Image: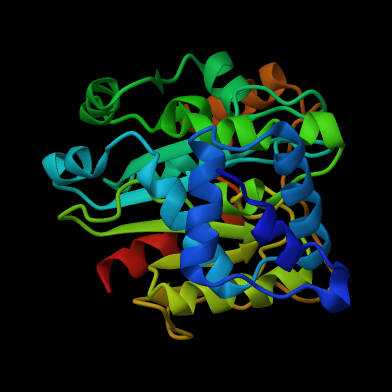
Amino acid sequence: MSIASYIKVIGRGQDGARPLSDEQAHDLLTQVFNGQVSDLEIGAFCLAMRIKGESTEELTGFVRAAHEHCVPLASVGSEIGLPLVVLPSYNGARKLPNLTPLLAWALSQQGLRVLVHGPEADRTRVTSYDVFQALNWPVVSSATTLLDAWRSGHPAFMAIATLCPPLAKLLDVRWIVGLRNSGHTVAKLLNPFEGAAVPSIRVVNHTHPEYAHSLTAYLEHSQARALLMRGTEGEPVADARRQPRFDVFLHGSKRPDLGRTPQEGVLTQLPELPTSFDAVATAQYIQDVVDGKRPLPEAIRVQVECLVQALAA
């Protein structure tokens, strides 16, 4: 097998490249995931898509292929019988504390079941896995251990290498070529509970404004239930210093009545945050919030409220 014919279409530069169809994109990534192509072809695919950018149809095919290679979790969602929140966590902390685990805890306090998925390690950032480990919160490796974590009332973390091993391998190409690839966008769109008998919502975040447009088009096309926002250093949690805009999609339709406008104007007060963003300091701060020693940052409280209302709508 070969993906050379697809590379020929997408690899002609920003002006000459053409988008693949949904089916072509699905076939391309399926071949990559099944180990049917060479490392050279994978590198060419990653760089070509990085230059061209993903179309709605390509994202649709890519995400479908990724879902087909995920461990089956939909039945777990159905068995627990409670609404689900998926927090794809793929960027980690670079300057600010990674408060995605705090958002997961706050959502679990509302009776929701929460799965955070992402890489275990990042050479340059503090991952949600690092913070979960420091908190001694559940890091799960199967549907059974996920169910156990949820039954105990905890949010859970699952490594992408467990959730979708071939996607984890594609993400690791970054450390060879020096750039993120389409796998990063796909990972941020994964919802392994599609098809569950209970409602689920994923938080989809972007770091650059142009991605807001392409992600909006994908969420509309795929008839998704999602909250779209500008992430905090690429994490799916509101910036504790200033609440971003929240756009809610139900069955692919944007619902302004359920979203939130961004906080504007000059900030007169900042929340007290950890002075360090390392995993231990972040975990201690989160534990203080859990223990009632510190307040939940207002921006994260509003995000929780927004997600709860979206799941109830």
The residue depicted at 69 percent of the width and 21 percent of the height is 279
Q: How far across and down, in percent of the image, does residue 51 sit?
A: 83, 61
Is 38 left, or right, of 60 in this rendering? right
The residue depicted at 23 percent of the width and 56 percent of the height is 195
In the depicted view, which residue is nearer to us: 196 or 12?
A: 12
- Where's the C terminus, which quadrant? bottom left
In the depicted view, which residue is nearer to us: 118 or 69?
A: 69
Q: Residue furthest front?
A: 1
- Where's the N terminus, which quadrant? top right
Q: How far across and down, in percent of the image, does residue 64 sit?
A: 42, 56
Is 115 left, or right, of 31 in this rendering? left
Compared with residue 51, is residue 188 higher up or lower down, i.e. above or below? above
Q: How is the image coloured?
A: rainbow
Is 174 left, or right, of 224 in this rendering? right
The residue depicted at 79 percent of the width and 57 percent of the height is 48
Q: How far across and down, in percent of the image, does residue 19 sit?
A: 66, 73
Compared with residue 152, is residue 79 higher up or lower down, i.e. above or below? below
Confirm whether residue 101 shows in the render: no
In the depicted view, which residue is nearer to us: 223 or 111?
A: 223
Q: Image quadrant of residue 129?
A: top right
Q: How many marks?
A: 0
In the depicted view, which residue is nearer to us: 97 or 251?
A: 251
Compared with residue 63, is residue 292 higher up or lower down, i.e. above or below? above
Q: Image quadrant of residue 41?
A: top right
Confirm whether residue 202 shows in the render: yes
Is 112 left, or right, of 284 in this rendering? left
Q: How far across and down, in percent of the image, does residue 115 sit?
A: 40, 39
The residue depicted at 80 percent of the width and 29 percent of the height is 175
